[in-house]
Amino acid sequence: MDQTVIAEKVKDGDTRTVQDYIDETPFWADGTSVPDGPMSGMQWRIWWLSIAGKFFEGLVVFMTGVALPLLAKDWDLTAAQHGMVGASTLFGILIGASALGALSDYFGRKPMFIFEIGLFTLFLALIVVSPGFIWFIVCLFGLGLALGCDYPTAHVMISESTPSRIRGRLVLGAFGFQAAGALAGTAVGYFALSLDPDVGAWRWMYGAALIPALLVLIGRFYVTESPHWLAEMGQDQKAEHELNRLLQRHPPYPPQFNLPAAQAEAAARKESGYRALFKKKNRRALVLASVPWFLQDLGTYGIGIFTPTILAASLGHKREHAQNVADIVHNDLLAAKGAAMVDVLLLIGIAVAVLLSDKVGRIKLQVLGFIGCAAGLFIAAQSALFSDDDPLKLVLIFAGFMLFNFMTNLGPNAQTYLIAGEVFPTKARAKGAGLAASFAKVGACTTAFLFPILLADIGTQALLYILVGTSLLGALVTWLFRIETKGVTLDTVGVELR
C-alpha cells in the first residue's frame, strides 16, 4: 500500500477509545475508505502465542487418554485411580481459571500471560520424571493450574488486541488449536508407542511438549500489555504507548493516539469484582457464560478422554484379557488409531465455527451444536443393541462420536469459550471468564472422575443417554439466557456491569 495515498480521516474534537483505534481502517487520499486494514505484526504475534495454551490443553488431556492403559499397567491402577488421572488436570484448570486467571484484572494481562506458560513448563518437566502415582497426580494438577490461568488470559489477550469485526474468528481460531492439540496428543501417543513399545512410553509422550513450551515462554516476553486494561487502570500514557506498539504498520496509521477520556472514565467507574458478577442485573450474563459451558464439558471431556478406552472395548481386533505389555500396547495403538480418526472431526468443526461465528452469531451456533451433540450421542448409544461381531455396532459408534465431535466444536465447545470472554467489561473480563471456566470444569472433573466408574456400573448406553439429556438442556439454557455478542465492540459489551 503506497504511503502517499493514505490519510487519516478524523473529525474535529473526535475522542476515541482504545477499541476505536484498533477497529479503525485507513482512508485513501481522496477520502475513500479501505474495507479492511491489515493486522499488525504484533497483533499476529499475540495471536500465535495465545494459541499455545489451547494446543497444550488438547495435547495433555487427550494424550492422557492414550497414556492411561500404560499408566494402569505401570502402577496397577484401580478404577478410582483411573478417574483421578482423568480429573486431576481438569481440577487444576477449575482452580487456575478463577484463582490465577482473574489476577490479570489486577496485575495486567502480560505478566499472567508469561507466568502461566512458565508454570506449565515447570510441571511438564516434573511429570516426565514422576517416581510414582501420587507425584504424577500432583504434576497433572499443576499443569491444570497453568492451563486454567490461560483460559481467561489468552482470550482477553486476543480479544483486547484485535478488531471487533474479526474478533470471533480470531478467538475461535486460537481455540481451534485445542482440537489440533487433541489430534497431536493422540499422534504423539501413537508414535511414542510405535518407537518404544513399553509401559514407560508415556514419559516420552509428555516430554515431547517441553521444547515447544520453552519457545512459547520466551516469545511471550516480547508482546504488548493490553491497552484496554491500561486505560481502565487510568494509565493513559502507557496505554497510548502500548497502543502505538500494537498497531505499528507500514505505512503507519493512525499517525498518533489520544485517549483523553480514558483516565476520567476509569476514575468514575466503580470497582467490578466477583460481587458485581452476582448482582441481579448481571446474572443473565453469568448464567449464559457458565451453565451451558458446564453442560458441554460433561460430554466433551468424558467422551474425549475416554474415547480410546471406549473404542478399545468396541473394536473387533482387540486382544481380550490383555495381561502382558505386548497385548496392552497393541490394544492402545488400536484405540489411538480410532481416536485419531474421530478427533479429525474436532478440527473440521472448529474450522466451520471460525467461518460462521461472525456471520451467523454465537447463540444460533451454540444451540444448533448442542442439539447436534445430543444426536451424535444418541446414535452412539444405539450400538449397545448390536453384538460385538456385528459391523453395524462399529459404524454406529464411529458415526455417533464423529458427529458429536463435529457439532461440539461447531457449537458449544467453541462458542461457550468465546461468549465467556465477551459478555463482561474490561475491568471484570478476566474474573467473569475465569469464573465461567472454573464452573465449567466442575462438569469436566465430575465426568472425568465418574466416567470410568459409571462405565463399569451402568454401561456405555445408559451413560450416553444421560449425556444426551445434558446436551439438550444446554441448548435450552442457551436460548433462554441468550445475549448475542456478534460484531459488538468491547467498549459496549457488558456495559451493564459498569
Image (cartoon, rainbow, N blue to C red):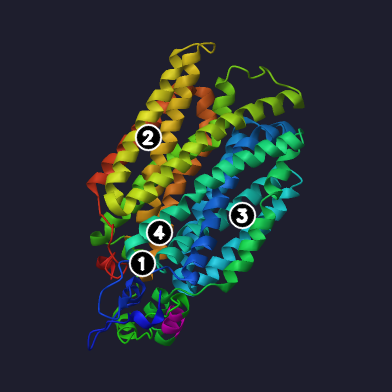
Of callouts 2 and 3, which one flags the residue occurring earlier in the amino acid sequence?
3
Q: CA distance from mark 4 to mark 3?
A: 20 Å
Kind of element beneath mark 3: helix
Q: CA distance from mark 1 to mark 4?
A: 20 Å
* Residue shown at 71% from the left, 49% from the top: 207
**Relative image position of residue 336 (x, y in whole percent):** 61, 32
Q: Is residue 351 visible?
A: yes
Drawn side of residue 492 relative to residue 18, left or right: left
Q: CA distance from mark 1 to mark 2?
A: 31 Å
User: Residue 163: which numbered mark, if any?
Assistant: 1
Of callouts 4 and 2, which one flags the residue occurring earlier in the amino acid sequence?
2
Of callouts 4 and 3, which one flags the residue occurring earlier in the amino acid sequence?
3
* Residue shown at 58% from the left, 31% from the top: 308
Above or below, comparing residue 498 to residue 253 in the picture: above
User: Residue 373: which numbered mark, if any?
Assistant: 2
To which residue does mark 3 refer? 142
Above or below, comparing residue 420 to residue 80 in the picture: below
Q: Are marks 1 and 4 in contact (CB under 8 Å)?
A: no
Locate the C terminus by quadrant. bottom left
Q: Which residues are magenta?
A: 238-244
Q: Main secondary structure of the magenta part?
A: helix
Of callouts 1 and 2, which one flags the residue occurring earlier in the amino acid sequence?
1
Kind of element beneath mark 2: helix
User: Residue 433: which numbered mark, if any?
Assistant: 4
Q: CA distance from mark 4 to mark 2?
A: 24 Å
Q: How many marks?
A: 4
Q: Amino acid at mark 2?
A: Cys
Q: Is disc 1 surrounded by few (<14), some (14 to 19) or many (20+) residues within 10 Å? A: many
Q: Is residue 118 visible?
A: no
Drawn side of residue 317 relative to residue 436, left or right: right
